[in-house]
Amino acid sequence: MNRTTLSLIAGATALAAVTGFAAVSAPDPEAAGQRTGAAATLPVERTGLLCPRPSTSDLAETTYTSFTPVTEGADDEGTAVLRSAAQQSAPDGDAEDAGGEKDGDDASADEESAKDEKGEKGDKDAAEDDKADRPVLQLKEPGKPVTAETEGADAPALVGTADGRFASGWTAQQTTEVAAGTGRGLQGVACSAADTQFWFPGASTDDSRTDYIHLTNPDDSAAVVDIELYGKDGELETTVGEGITVKPRSAEPVLLSTLTAEKQTDVTVHVVVRSGRVGAAVQALDDETGGDWLPASADPSGRLVMPGIPKDAKAVRLVAFTPGDAGVDLKVRLAAPSGLITPAGNETLHLKGGMTAAFDLGELTRGEAGSLVLTAPDGSVPVVAAVRVLRGEEGKQESAFIPAARPIETRATALDNTAKGTTLSVTAPEGGAEIKVTASAGTKGGTPQTKTYSIKSGTTQDIEAPVPAGLKGSYALTVETRSGGPVYASRTLASTEGGVPFFTVQPLPDDRGVVAVPDASEDLSVLQR
């Protein structure tokens, strides 16, 4: 094998690592429509997602949704399957082999032995085993979402893989409604790729909160995880936060208040994976104000954006943390429909190094769409942050979280949308942008619709997103950047139950569905240095 080929493999491997489970193959310039000698943009060929266990409430009603947008240049074949984390992933049609394949006489002997042991209950047990091995959710075609529903506290964490035509842009979401009790309300979270480090500013160990960090291991070997907690005075002393083992193909919810004796309202959680990889998300449940999922913040940075704070937010609480010893004065601005403004009385916020700080920003948006923009001087000090949002009147309030988000570089998708109760919020804090928004076919019928929008520099817009013609069921909204930016977006789902405004907000991360792979004719030896 010559040096150029080796270099290409190194480059493709590095790109695959960046996209979590994602994998690509060597580019075909003709198929990709790219000239020889230039970087070819190709769809990923394999990717994976993890969904945490939805709820511990017997009153929970959960909807899982899976979707892949139509991608030019993708393969003609493939699968996208979500299974219980306790089941081994298997390709389409191999559900019966989920526990491992056997060949020839060994398989026959095992089958006969199993029949003898089961006796008269054999048929019934076999049917139950077959049902247990079936995928929870499986896509049939790109461009059309599928859903599955479950009730109660037994809904599992999910592990999934997609390949071929389903891999590029594959997105999954779980939305749970809890009618009453701690954490009552609407809880939504986008399923995410496995990683080795996560930051969660905005968690709590206070008596009024029941916060879990959900760890999901998709692999065949155990993962070892450390959980660090940082409060207002620095790192909290933890008793069992180090060396937590997450068994293969399993999910482990860890109650944060069991890790430390200190009760603090605002805590930053840092998850570090010593070996293996996991998916991680915090489920934050409050006795009085409901609850929601707190996804991981974008990586520590000197510039952060929290997109799509609801225009009717009654209270906005910012929680921020900077690793290391250096403090920082953050410049605070709100990207409103008219442009960037500085909130009165909150022009700058001071963070001490290694300490979690919280700031009440009140009714920040005042009836208009808004996104919070934080900037460190010269971007020199990295920060992680999230906001907690309350809607509704006193005694009938619901809460949700918006962490600092990553920009949509190419494309992102939000699932489980309905004709009413869906708000798509888009911001371009640094420069104007043009975006294309596509409403997919509905889960039970409907024709896709597409619209193009211009987002002015420094503004946030709650756009009137398209809805599929003749919609039946729910649908996906896919946002694609056409020019300008960077662009950040979030989607809010809302309903009213018993006078309480149930809602959940999900930032839209780039789906990493395409990657730039250098052409094989280039000398990529620099990648090996």
Image: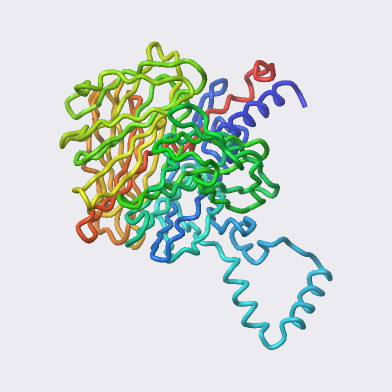
Residue 146, percent across and down? 42, 58
Identify the image quadrant of residue 22.
top right
For the N terminus, the image quarter is: top right
| Residue 360 appears in the rendering | yes
Q: Which quadrant of the structure image shows residue 197?
A: top right
Seen at 72% across and 25% down, the residue is 6
Q: Is residue 417 left or right of residue 189?
A: left
Q: Residue furthest top?
A: 378
The color scheme shown is: rainbow
Outermost residue, bottom direction?
120
Q: Nearer the viewer, residue 12 or 28?
A: 12
Residue 231: image x %, image y %?
A: 46, 32
Number of numbered discs on residues: 0
Residue ID at (42%, 19%):
302
Q: In which quadrant of the rendered view does residue 184 lie?
A: bottom left
The residue depicted at 24 percent of the width and 40 percent of the height is 310
From what the image shows, is residue 177 above or below residue 76?
below
Residue closest to the far front: 261
Please state which of residues 124 and 411 is positioned toward the viewer in this rendering.
124
Regarding residue 78, the answer to whether it shows in the image is no
Q: Does residue 252 lie above or below 94 as drawn?
A: above
Q: Quadrant of the C terminus?
A: top right
Vertical comparison of 51 with 360: above or below? below
* Place of residue 143 in the rendered image (x, y in percent of width and height, measured from the top left): 40, 51
| Nearer to us in this view, 71 or 297 | 297
Q: Position of residue 489 (x, y in %)?
A: 33, 35
